């Protein structure tokens, strides 16, 4: 008797049928072979990955942080805008961090969700940060710890977002009619609601363009990392990345596809694929590179460059994942690092509570990054 899946109902036997077709989620051992499989699954990885026409848009100093707004082109779409943050008055080179903003079904803003720029923070963003980030811009706090921190908008967010009317013209008439009837006076809420459905359309376009959303986002993150590595104030031998949720998703992909990352912190984005069956399949398309399940599981991507140091922080009551899925992923990561004789290079930390990167978790992550990169 096949296991019953509530989401699939009378098609529950589709799952064992898929397993009979071929082995799913095989163990993909760390190393170049797995890294090559990841890049092939992602696509969008065969051209120059350096930023084009970099410009310094503005500079400022505020609350102990020296900041720059930088922009560049990735070769398509509008220019990417980013913040570069470091301790005020710092001299010489510092270790670097790419801080990757989350998904959160909130695409109107990108970098501003985790970083403060030169202007007063909008009340909307202050309110947003309360639940996941302990009420603060963690990228600025990380900069004050002695890092050059890069926070950039990525494909579909902030400066890289699609115009509202373009999204509405792209999507099917039924979706557009529903969104029109639900519109409010809040421009940002209307945008985020439309962007939720638009991601499905973008994923279709990715497929017929030979890639997937994970591949396009990861490409743009590699371009950003290459910019950070090029800066004279960055110690290019000591660069890491960090992100919560969709940012953690991006951190796993960036680490797997770029040798320049020397330490990785993933928060609230670790599970096995099997544990997602019948649970939380509303995740972003970034978590599901097309065809990867035939080659490995999600933790295999995060561990593909082992023994590169990896910290994963888990929230035990995270409503986006099952506890079993998180613990199984933790064990799989441990096995990968044990298999190459470097078990201490992986650290898994479990915290009570919901989907978050609160002040306690930030302090632990910052200390770990300092230990790895300074």
Image (cartoon, rainbow, N blue to C red):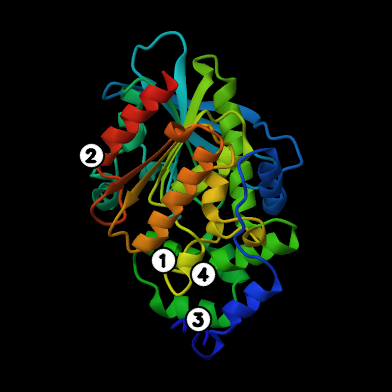
Which numbered mark, 4 or 1, is in the foreground of this view?
Answer: 4
- Provide the residue designation for mark 1: 190
Q: What element carries label 3?
A: helix
- Provide the residue designation for mark 2: 360
Q: Is mark 1 on a helix, strand or loop?
A: helix
Residue 251 visible in image: yes
Mark closer to the chain start, 3 or 2: 3
**Coordinates of residue 121 in the picture (x, y in percent):** 29, 41
Near-viewer residue (132 or 265): 265
On screen, 189 above or below 38? below
Residue 197 disc label: 4
On screen, 149 above or below 233? below
Residue 40 disc label: none
Please report the residue visible at 59 percent of the width from the left and 78 percent of the height from the top. Answer: 16
Mark 3 to mark 2 CA distance (whole Å)? 44 Å
- Residue occupying the far top of the picture: 92
Q: In which quarter of the image is residue 364?
A: top left
Near-viewer residue (309 or 94): 309
Q: What element carries label 2?
A: helix
Mark 4 to mark 2 CA distance (whole Å)? 34 Å
Mark closer to the chain start, 1 or 3: 3
Neighbourhood count class around disc 3 (C-alpha, 10 Å): few under 14, some 14–19, many 20 upward:
few
On screen, 177 above or below 340? below
**Coordinates of residue 235 in the picture (x, y in percent):** 51, 16
| CB contact under 8 Å: marks 4 and 2 | no
Mark closer to the chain start, 1 or 2: 1
- Provide the residue designation for mark 3: 177
């Amino acid at each position: 008797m096949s296991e019953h899946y509530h989401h699939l109902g009378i098609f529950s036997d589709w799952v064992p049928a898929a397993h009979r077709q071929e082995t799913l989620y095989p163990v993909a051992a760390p190393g170049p072979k797995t890294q090559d499989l990841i890049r092939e699954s992602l696509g969008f990885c065969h051209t120059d990955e350096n930023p084009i026409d970099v410009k310094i848009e503005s500079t400022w100093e505020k609350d102990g942080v020296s900041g720059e707004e930088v922009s560049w082109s990735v070769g398509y779409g509008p220019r990417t805008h980013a913040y570069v943050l470091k301790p005020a008055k710092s001299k010489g080179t510092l270790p670097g961090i790419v801080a990757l903003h989350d998904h959160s079904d909130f695409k109107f803003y990108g970098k501003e969700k985790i970083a403060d720029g030169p202007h007063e923070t909008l009340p909307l963003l202050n309110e947003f940060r309360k639940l996941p980030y302990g009420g603060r811009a963690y990228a600025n706090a990380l900069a004050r710890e002695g890092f050059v921190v890069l926070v950039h908008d990525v494909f579909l967010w902030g400066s890289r977002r699609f115009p509202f009317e373009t999204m509405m013209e792209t999507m099917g008439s039924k979706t557009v009619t529903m969104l029109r009837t639900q519109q409010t006076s809040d421009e940002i809420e209307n945008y985020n609601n439309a962007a939720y459905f638009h991601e499905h359309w973008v994923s279709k376009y990715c497929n017929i363009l030979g890639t997937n959303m994970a591949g396009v986002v990861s490409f743009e993150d590699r371009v950003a990392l290459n910019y950070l590595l090029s800066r004279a104030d960055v110690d290019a031998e000591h660069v890491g990345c960090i992100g919560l949720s969709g940012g953690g998703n991006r951190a796993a992909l960036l680490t797997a596809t770029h040798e320049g990352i020397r330490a990785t912190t993933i928060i609230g984005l670790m599970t096995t694929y099997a544990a997602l069956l019948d649970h939380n399949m509303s995740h972003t398309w970034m978590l599901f590179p097309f065809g990867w399940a035939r080659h490995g599981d999600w933790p295999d991507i995060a561990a593909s460059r082992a023994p590169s140091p990896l910290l994963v922080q888990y929230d035990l009551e995270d409503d986006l994942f099952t506890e079993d899925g998180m613990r199984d992923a933790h064990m799989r990561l441990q096995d990968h690092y044990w298999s190459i004789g470097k078990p201490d290079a992986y650290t898994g930390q479990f915290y009570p509570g919901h989907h978050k990167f609160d002040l306690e978790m930030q302090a632990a992550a910052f200390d770990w990054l300092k230990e790895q990169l300074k």
